[in-house]
Amino acid sequence: MSVFLVILVVLIVCVVALIALYNNLVKMRNMVDNAWAQIDVQLQRRLDLIPNVVETVKGYAMHESSTLQNVTVARAAVAAAGTPEAKMQANEQLTAALRQLFAVAEGYPDLKANTNFLSLQQELSNTEDKISYMRQSYNDTVMKYNTSIETFPAMLFAGLMGFHKRESFAADASAAVAPQIQF
């Protein structure tokens, strides 16, 4: 009878430990999803601001149509991306296109003095700062989640319970290169 009781207690402890492990992994996965949702909110905010910036620049820099078109195409790619990974990649292209757009704007003193443009530029700058912060938060959360599913004993059960490694938000190599503008 006491051997049966010991086995029963050990079994109950194992089940409780597995339930606690599962609940912790669910919590970590939800934190990753929430961190991505915060990035997505800021990306959408930026997408909403971009048409206003493009329209403002159009009035001053009509012959810069290729730069304006690059921003529009990159914006559409972000909006159409279906997965976080695709959005990450499209976002890098949009960031490069926006850098080029603002570099072009430097060549137009009247545009640089336009209060609408300055306001929109400030809003985009604030949004970029928020996106940067959210990326860092997302990457920290992904690191914690990935560590949770790769450490013992979770590594034994995580895959079986449907928990898989997530990708961090990594900057594209082209993000480090400043745009070249020639007038």
Image (cartoon, rainbow, N blue to C red):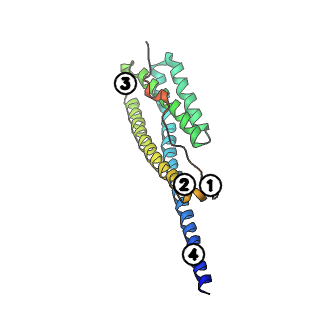
Contact between labelled residues 3 and 4, with CB atoms less than 8 Å apart:
no
In the structure shown, which secondary structural element does the residue marked by tag 1 occupy?
loop
Q: Nearer the viewer, mark 4 or mark 3?
A: 4
Marks 2 and 1 sit apart, C-alpha to C-alpha, by 8 Å
Labels 2 & 4 near each other (Cβ < 8 A): no
Q: Tag 2, which secondary structure?
A: helix
User: Which disc number belongs to residue 112?
Assistant: 3
Instruction: Report the residue that reaches farthest toward the top.
Output: 183
Is 86 or 143 nearer to us in this picture?
A: 143
Work out whether residue 51 can be spotted: no
Q: Which of marks 4 and 3 is nearer the N terminus?
A: 4
Q: What residue type is labelled 2?
A: Ile
At horizontal 40% and vertical 29% (from top left) the residue drawn is: 117
Task: Residue under label 4, please give it.
Answer: 10
Q: Is residue 49 visible?
A: yes
Q: Where is residue 119 in the image (x, y as percent from the top left)?
A: 38, 34
Kind of residue at badge 1: Gly
Q: Which mark is residue 159?
A: 1
- Few, some or many residues within 10 Å of mark 1 (<14, 14–19, 20+): few
Secondary structure type for disc 3? helix
Under mark 3, the amino acid is Lys
Residue 149's disc number: 2
Nearest to the observer: residue 9 or residue 100: 9
Give the number of the mark in front: 2 or 3.
2
Give the quarter of the figure containing the C terminus: top left
- Nearest to the eye among marks 3 and 1: give it: 1
The residue lying toward the viewer, choosing from 153 and 23, is 153
